[in-house]
Image (cartoon, grey):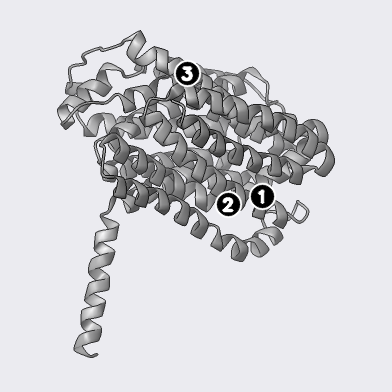
């Protein structure tokens, strides 16, 4: 091998090492572990459950995302964007002083485990609206809320290696618990999924809490209605509107396409999981850069990276779909068009998320609420009309239109505030 080839190989190796240790790589590992759990669980469930049953699961897991996101919007985001600490000790004090009560998690865990152990679901699993399912949903949502609170701390501290470790621990614990439920052939599959996710969240939360010596940190409560809760109310209201905009199709479209149609939409979404792995960590890094007030050039590069990675993430889908359609998705009709529409929706959502982060960091919570209200009204109307006219395809087109409308509204309203 010539000297020039050796030098090129060495340069490539060095660049690889630099990338592995970069914030982007650690962010991708963290998100891949977190989103990978959802991907694998959905893959198993869509292959084993009937389409109607999978549609019911889609409705149930949406409640988890709504509740955990509500806590994040009401509280976590405010604590994050108002983090003015200049060192790790000050940041620990800030986050510890606003930590959600840990005893809530403990009480809900004990109650859920007792309820799951004492209840007896009929063959085929408990109904979605049964008490054990409802309680396990609450437990899972609060677990996500707690874990994501400390994950935001690691992002603000630029400690993405620990973010990655925590998310890997979440993935391993959740999947271990879930497959234990499958091996034991527990009928209560819904409760098993949600409690497995809660166990993973608890493990990740505990790792960060111990790793950064939170138990030795003296909390200095700084609760302030004007500084935190009032903006948090706008954030929570915006989150409610955003969830209704993003997940409203889960409850509106079945009126026209049935649970099977909803299952087709969410089954197609599984194949676009790569963008859900790569885009969120870049968005978190983008937010951290804005909080640290980095130069405009760095902010613009970050914005371009998010869009480029989202586009590139869609490329493997075309190669994977033919195989998935013959195996995991064999119970469904041709979903290729729905898969392609989800790719377009992912790109539109990525662009909207960069604008939303910039609005949040600038504390323009009223703009956020107004924009989501506008997008929500358009989404509801479009989902109703297009689902009725074009079925599942129409529902997805409505979601894409909502993202475009939200982005335009952000741009316009930002000039007036």
Quadrant of residue 109 within the rendered picture: top left
Residue 400, given in percent of the width and then of the height, sits at 64, 43
Badge 1, how many Cα within 10 Å: few under 14, some, many 20+?
many
Q: Is residue 19 above or below residue 162?
A: below
Q: Which mark is residue 272?
A: 2
Q: Nearer the viewer, residue 17 or 178?
A: 17
Rendered-image quadrant of the C terminus? top left
Q: Are marks 2 and 1 in contact (CB under 8 Å)?
A: yes
Q: Secondary structure at mark 2?
A: loop
Q: Secondary structure at mark 1?
A: helix
Give the residue pinned by disc 1. Answer: 268
Q: Which of pointers 2 and 3 lies earlier in the amino acid sequence?
A: 3
**Res. 49 visible in picture:** no
The residue sitting at 48% across, 39% down in the picture is 353
Q: Which of pointers 1 and 3 lies earlier in the amino acid sequence?
A: 3
The residue sitting at 40% across, 35% down in the picture is 358
Give the residue pinned by disc 3. Answer: 234
The residue sitting at 61% across, 24% down in the picture is 133
Q: Secondary structure at mark 3?
A: helix
């Amino acid at each position: 091998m010539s000297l020039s080839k050796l030098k090129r190989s060495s340069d490539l190796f060095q660049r690889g090492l630099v990338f592995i240790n970069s914030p982007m790589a650690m962010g991708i590992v963290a998100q891949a572990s977190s989103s990978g759990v959802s991907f694998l669980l959905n893959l198993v469930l869509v292959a084993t459950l009937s389409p109607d049953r999978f549609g019911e699961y889609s409705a149930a897991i949406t409640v988890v995302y709504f509740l955990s996101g509500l806590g994040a919007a009401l509280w976590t985001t405010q604590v994050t964007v108002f983090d003015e600490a200049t060192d790790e000790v000050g940041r620990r004090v800030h986050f510890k002083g606003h930590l959600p009560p840990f005893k809530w998690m403990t009480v809900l865990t004990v109650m859920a485990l007792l309820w799951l152990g004492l209840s007896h679901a009929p063959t085929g699993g408990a109904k979605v609206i049964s008490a054990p399912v409802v309680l396990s949903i609450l437990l899972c949502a609060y677990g996500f809320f707690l874990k994501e609170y400390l994950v935001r701390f690691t992002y603000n501290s630029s400690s993405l290696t620990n973010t990655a470790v925590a998310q890997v621990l979440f993935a391993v614990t959740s999947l271990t618990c879930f497959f234990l439920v499958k091996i034991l052939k527990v009928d209560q599959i819904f409760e098993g999924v949600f409690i497995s996710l809660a166990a993973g969240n608890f493990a990740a939360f505990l790792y960060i809490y111990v790793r950064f010596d939170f138990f030795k940190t003296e909390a200095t409560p700084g609760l302030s209605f004007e500084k935190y809760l009032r903006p948090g109310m706008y954030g929570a209201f915006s989150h409610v509107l955003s969830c209704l905009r993003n997940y409203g199709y889960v409850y509106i479209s079945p009126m026209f396409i049935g649970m099977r149609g909803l299952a087709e939409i969410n089954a197609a979404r599984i194949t676009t999981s790569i963008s859900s792995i790569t885009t969120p960590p870049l968005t978190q890094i983008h937010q951290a850069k804005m909080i640290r007030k980095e130069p405009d050039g760095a902010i613009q590069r970050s914005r371009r990276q998010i869009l480029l990675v989202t586009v590139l993430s869609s490329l493997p889908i075309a190669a994977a779909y033919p195989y998935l359609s013959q195996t995991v998705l064999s119970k469904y009709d041709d979903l290729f068009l729905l898969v392609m529409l989800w790719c377009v929706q992912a790109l539109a959502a990525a662009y909207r998320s960069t604008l939303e982060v910039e609005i949040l960091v600038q504390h323009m919570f009223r703009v956020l609420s107004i924009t989501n209200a506008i997008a929500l009204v358009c989404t509801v109307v479009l989902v109703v009309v297009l689902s009725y006219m074009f079925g599942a395809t129409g529902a997805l087109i409505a979601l894409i239109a909502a993202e475009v409308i939200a982005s335009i509204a952000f741009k316009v309203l930002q000039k007036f505030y």
